[in-house]
Image (spheres, rainbow, N blue to C red):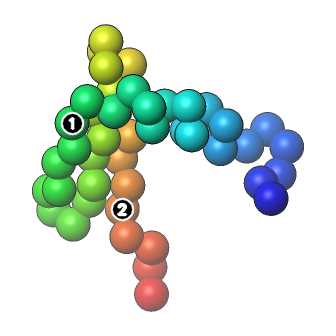
Amino acid sequence: MCPSKSLSDRFIRGLGDVRSYLFRGGRLYLSLMADGGVYEFEPMPR
């Protein structure tokens, strides 16, 4: 249940366009097809 104006729908659609992934420095990078950008994830603070 994401609030309105959330990026959740855009993110979910983008998952189908992931062409590669990389773990570096404790972060996850997901590269999208056709120069669609890169999703970057970092661990949540404890």
Task: Out of 6 and 33, give the one closest to the viewer.
Answer: 33
Q: Which one is closest to the eye, mark 2 or mark 1?
A: 1
What residue is drawn where x is 57% and y is 40%?
12
Mark linked to residue 42: 2
Mark linked to residue 7: none
Q: Amino acid at mark 1?
A: Ser
| Residue underneath mark 1 | 20
What residue is drawn where x is 14% and y is 56%?
24
Q: Quadrant of residue 39?
A: top left
Q: Amino acid at mark 2?
A: Glu
Do the numbered discs 2 and 1 sit on residues whose CB atoms are within 8 Å?
A: no
Left or right: where 30 falls relative to 7: left
Total marks shown come to 2
Which quadrant holds the C terminus? bottom left
Give the mark nearer the N terminus: 2 vs 1: 1
Q: Is residue 37 visible?
A: no
Which quadrant holds the N terminus? bottom right
Eyeballing the image, is 16 above or below 39? above
Question: What x and y, as percent, mark residue 27?
Answer: 26, 59
